[in-house]
Amino acid sequence: MPEASVTPLPFARRTHLDGTPCLEGTRRVPAGFTPCCETFAAHTATCEHDLRYEWWANASEWVIRLPTPGGGGGVSISHCPHCGAALSSAHP
């Protein structure tokens, strides 16, 4: 099972008004991640209150992340919502 890596990007670490950490500027993607399109790539580093895609290594799947205050979790996806490419652990 491919390991996911959480990569900090050059953004300031913030918290939301409820005290939960903001994930903007971090990514949870598989090792060797190559995005299928620029839009998908951009949404791997957004806040969970925006549209955020993550690789969940324990489930071996890509998900649309749901905000923690709303119950958290994720919705499994198998194709890029933007370009239609099939998503996989090696090449989304």
Image (cartoon, grey):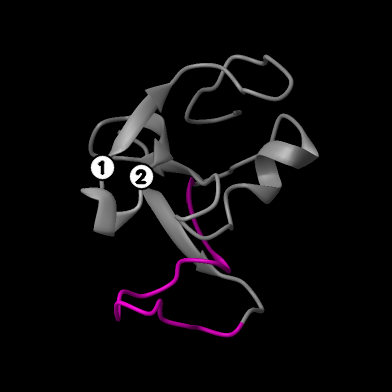
CB atoms of marks 1 and 2 within 8 Å: yes
Disc 1 marks a residue whose amino acid type is Gly
Predominant secondary structure, magenta span: loop
- The local secondary structure at tag 1 comes to loop
Q: Residue at x 63, y 79 (%)?
A: 11
Does label 1 or label 2 sit earlier along the sequence?
2
Q: Residue at x 39, y 49 (%)?
A: 4
Disc 2 marks a residue whose amino acid type is Leu
Q: Would you name the residue on which mark 1 appears? A: 73
> Furthest residue to the right?
38
Q: Would you name the residue on which mark 2 appears? A: 66
Asked which quadrant contains residue 92, the reply is top right
Residue 61 image label: none
CA separation in Å, label 1 and label 2: 5 Å
Depth check: 78 or 52 in front?
52
- The local secondary structure at tag 2 comes to loop
Taking the image as shown, residue 34 lies to the left or right of residue 16, namely right
Give neighbour class at mark 2: few <14, some 14-19, many 20+ (Cα, 10 Å).
some
Query: Which quadrant of the figure contains the N terminus?
Result: top left
Look at the image and say whether residue 23 sits in the magenta stretch: yes
Depth check: 62 or 22 in front?
22
What x and y, as percent, mark residue 8? 54, 72
Q: Where does the magenta region start and end? A: 12-30
Depth check: 67 or 64 in front?
67
What x and y, as percent, mark residue 39? 74, 39
Residue 54 lies, with reference to residue 60, above or below; the image says below
Residue 4 lies, with reference to residue 82, above or below; the image says below
Residue 8 lies, with reference to residue 36, above or below; the image says below
